[in-house]
Amino acid sequence: MSSKLVKDLSCPVCHDIFKEPVVLSCSHSFCNDCLQRWWTEKLIHECPLCKKITLLNDPPRNLVLKNLCEAFLLERDQRASAEPLCSLHSEKLRLFCLDHQQPVCVVCRDSKTHNNHRFRPIDEAAQDHREELQITLKPLQEKLKLFEQVKINYHQTAEHIKVQAQHTERQIKEQFKKFHQFLKEEEEVRITALREEEEQKSQVMKEKMEALSREIAALSHTVRATEDELRAKDVSFLHNYKVTVERVQQRPLLDDPQLVSGALIDVAKHLGNLTFNIWKKMKEMVSYSPVILDPNTAEPHLILSEDLTSVQRGEKQKLPVNPERFKIHHCVSSSEGFHSGTHSWDVEVKRGQSWTLGVVGEFALGKEKIHAGFWELCLLDGKYTAASPPLSDKVLSVKNKPQRIRVQLDCEGGKLSFYDLDTNTHIHTFGDVQTFIFTDTEWLFPYIRNNNELPLKILPAPVSVTVEQCTIPTSVWQSFSMLLN
């Protein structure tokens, strides 16, 4: 209650809240009994404050002031009845025992139970414990905020999965339109596989979002309940403080949810080498690319062709932040990596003015900064450079501007070589790739960086089909015939 309000509603004579207030012609108000007693002691009827004489023996009632006083007294009584009292002594709880961590009254303070204990005024203790609880609550609040942001990313990923599935389905259908009717069954098989993957991965995302929603709900409940306690009155807050702190502290801070690799539709699996996979039926239409670019790794500025064999720079796209995706450098990697054998692929670079070709270790995929584990040949500002950190970059002497470059990776020999395909000229070879591929778990992925709006294209490899027939020697046939007889 405001001390000013109490003063305004108090009689100047008895200094208590007005009882049956009356008002004089000078506008001053007094309790009726207080005024009558004052006049009894005086010879004349004058105002006890300003001494102005009044001719009224029975001043009029101040009903407005009376109503205000009655409302004030009612509210004060309600407040007093709502304030908890000491269960042992029925006194107001004005102190807080630091040793027992509980509110106490002044009688408790002097009792044997609290002998030599430390006490604080209830308001100071409440403020200190509120600050402590705020500090304890802060990690939960931050975790809740992070979870909300991750849920948004999950939702964007789920939507992107649907877009990918729809786009991939459309490409598959367009590709299959080129074939004759007898390929219809193959088309249906692939569509079914795609839809099953969409359903499976969408279900995974749905389960993750549901799990995250449950965790958010639980965290929200804890945060709201704690915030309600923080807004409670001091005594009520301190009564519930132990339970509140235990609830906050016992709430586990789970690891930050992460979108695991492979959450997106494996577009490369459905679209990569599509015609090659059906070469037995339409071998004259087969086009095989030794490297398929993975759109799930493409930096958002890059645009891939429908068959995932060429890449160019464009406007930034709104894509989910999945772990495999390059964050910088306008790079995209292949869908499959190599860790054994010899592999080669040809890239058409005649339209590019700034590009990079090479291989990168699997561990570096999706990293914002790559300090090692990659080998590359790049063209920048008209200069050809070989780079393989932590070694220094090497500027190469290239006489003619290559139109097509062959990249050859020899995993066993530990070499990565680049050739001008048109002149069959060697450009550069890295001989230290072996230092990276030392176990079956180490994979190298071809990758391209394109800073141009014109595309770089992986050229199709020539396809040949050889049918080998097995000839059984005559002696084997004779032995087999003898067994039958």
Image: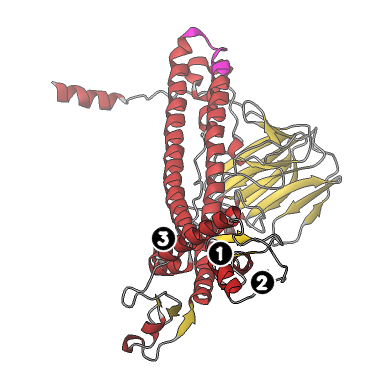
Label 2 vs label 1, nearer the camera: 2
Residue at image location 67% in from the left, 55% down from the top: 369
| Mark 3 crowd level (few <14, some 14–19, many ≥20, 10 Å Cα) | few
Is residue 36 visible to us here?
yes
| Residue 352: percent from left, percent from top | 80, 36
**Badge 1 amino acid:** Asn
The residue nearer to you, when weighing 366 against 382, is: 366
| Residue 418: percent from left, percent from top | 71, 44
Question: CA gap, disc 3 to disc 1?
Answer: 62 Å
Is residue 272 visible to us here?
no
Residue on which the image places disc 2: 44
What secondary structure is found at the residue carrying circle 1? helix
Of all residues shown, which one is farthest toward the front? Answer: 43
Q: Give, as a single range, the part of the protein colored magenta.
A: 173-181
**Badge 2 amino acid:** Ile
Question: CA gap, disc 2 to disc 1?
Answer: 16 Å
Q: Given contact means CB atoms under 8 Å apart, are the residues at marks 3 and 1 in contact?
A: no
Asked whether 174 falls inside the magenta stretch, the response is yes
Of all residues shown, which one is farthest toward the top? Answer: 181
Q: Is residue 241 above or below residue 458?
A: below
Residue on which the image places disc 1: 32
The residue nearer to you, when weighing 126 against 185, is: 126
